[in-house]
Image (cartoon, rainbow, N blue to C red):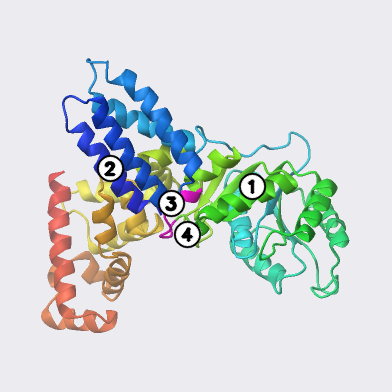
Amino acid sequence: MFTALSEQLAAVLKRLTGRGVLSESDVTEALREIRRHLLEADVSFEVTRGFVERVRERAVGVLQVKSVSPGQQVVKLVHDEIAGLLGGSRSGLDFASVGPTVILLVGLQGSGKTTTAAKLARRLKLEQKAPGLVAADPYRPAAREQLEQLGKQIDVPVFGVRDGGVGAQHAAPVQVPDLVRSALREAESARCRTVIVDTAGRLQIDATLMDELKALKAAVTPREVLLVADGMTGQDAVKIARGFHEGVGLTGVILTKLDGDARGGAALSIHGVTALPIKYVGVGEKPDALEPFDPARMAGRILGQGDVVALVEKAAATVDAKAAERLAQKARSKRGMDLQDFLVALKQMQAMGPMKQVLGLLPGVNAKALQAMPADDKRLKHVEAIVLSMTPAERADPGILSGSRKLRIAKGAGRPVQEVNRLLDQFQQMRKLMKRM
């Protein structure tokens, strides 16, 4: 989402760090450019103006310090202020000490509430919080069925409106709190420690929606009321957050579709306008594509400084440690890795997510170059198909691959023979490199 903004800010700050001496006019000119880029990224005018003024005031003192590079100091100021715009420090969920913690998800239709509920449940399950899901949307057709399917995928129980109960055409707003209370009792009996309530949405904020949410909040006294906002809607997401906060009182925000190509102004404005913390961000469609939001680390990503911590966390969560150790031992052995080991390593890489997303977490990776890079995820699938088309003997000893064998493998994988040859050449180069290492 922040590719364009990251590229622009990095270019401005690179010019500052490239100079040995900075004057106030240099900083003023740089801040003027930063201000323009933030406004182009759909950051609200009030937030942008406050950001620029704070950096300007602090930069004046930095220019007087001779022992540290002024350019690097200004970069740090910009980083800290962007982190401040995003909330300053990471804000987690508030869990109840006694009884199940109720988390109410609210938002408009199409913002991704139902899929976000499942993603959050999966994350809480990994954190040993014993989650349960409650379907509290009796209006949208197949809303409960969708949540139940997602619940089966992540092996989390779903409670709520059942067949034969109140139908989509007959549900009255006053009945929804009763339905949710009943579902909460079921969840408590099932010993759920956290309960995520997927509420009904509308196409726009209206009095009926707010009255229903107020009644539901009063009935179940949730510990968290989280707005699920579509990051692709730009400044509308900020207006929606303000409307829900004034209506029902939010405790935080989950921004979805942060892997899209929107300009990112919503993420940079939402805390500054509402003072609400962004607690999680959705970065894809899969159940594991929900990340805790860390303002300092996100500021680093925006400024092209990467996020090594997120990369390590992603690797720790997806990479099989025993398989990785076996690969390391094979690489150190006299014979080295074979194509079967290569296939295991490839699957470990694929488990970490899209290649561009993983590379974007590395420090110093140019945003423009990353954007221009051809999507390698399909290429990885082609490589996997080629290796799987080989026999175990061929994977163990690629040297036995004759022209006829390569032709058979190419046909089996649905790829040209040249691609099989290229893969074998790259594999031999990689094996030599790993032996040297």
Of circles 3 and 4, which is in front? 4
Q: Looking at the image, can residue 269 be seen?
A: yes
Residue 356 place in picture, x, y as percent: 32, 57
Of circles 4 and 1, which is in front? 1
Residue drawn at (74%, 64%), measured in percent from left and top? Answer: 137
Circle 3 Cα neighbour tier, 10 Å, few/some/many (<14 / 14–19 / ≥20):
some
The range drawn in magenta is 259-266
State the mark number for residue 318.
3
Position above or below: 125 against 149: above
Q: Name the residue under label 1.
A: 242
Q: Does 261 appear in magenta? A: yes
Whole-angstrom CA distance, mark 4 to mark 2, is 25 Å
Looking at the rendered structure, the kind of residue marked 3 is: Thr
State the mark number for residue 10.
2
Residue 315 place in picture, x, y as percent: 39, 47
Q: Looking at the image, can residue 307 be seen?
A: no
Which SS does the magenta portion mostly show? loop
Q: Earlier in the sequence, mark 4 or mark 2?
A: 2
SS at mark 3 in the image:
helix
Q: Name the residue under label 4.
A: 284
Q: Nearer the viewer, residue 148 or 69?
A: 69
Q: Which quadrant of the figure contains the N terminus?
A: bottom left
Q: Which quadrant of the figure contains the C terminus?
A: top left
Whole-angstrom CA distance, mark 4 to mark 1, is 25 Å
Residue 171 place in picture, x, y as percent: 84, 69
Is 223 situated left or right of 238 in this image?
Answer: right
Whole-angstrom CA distance, mark 1 to mark 3, is 37 Å
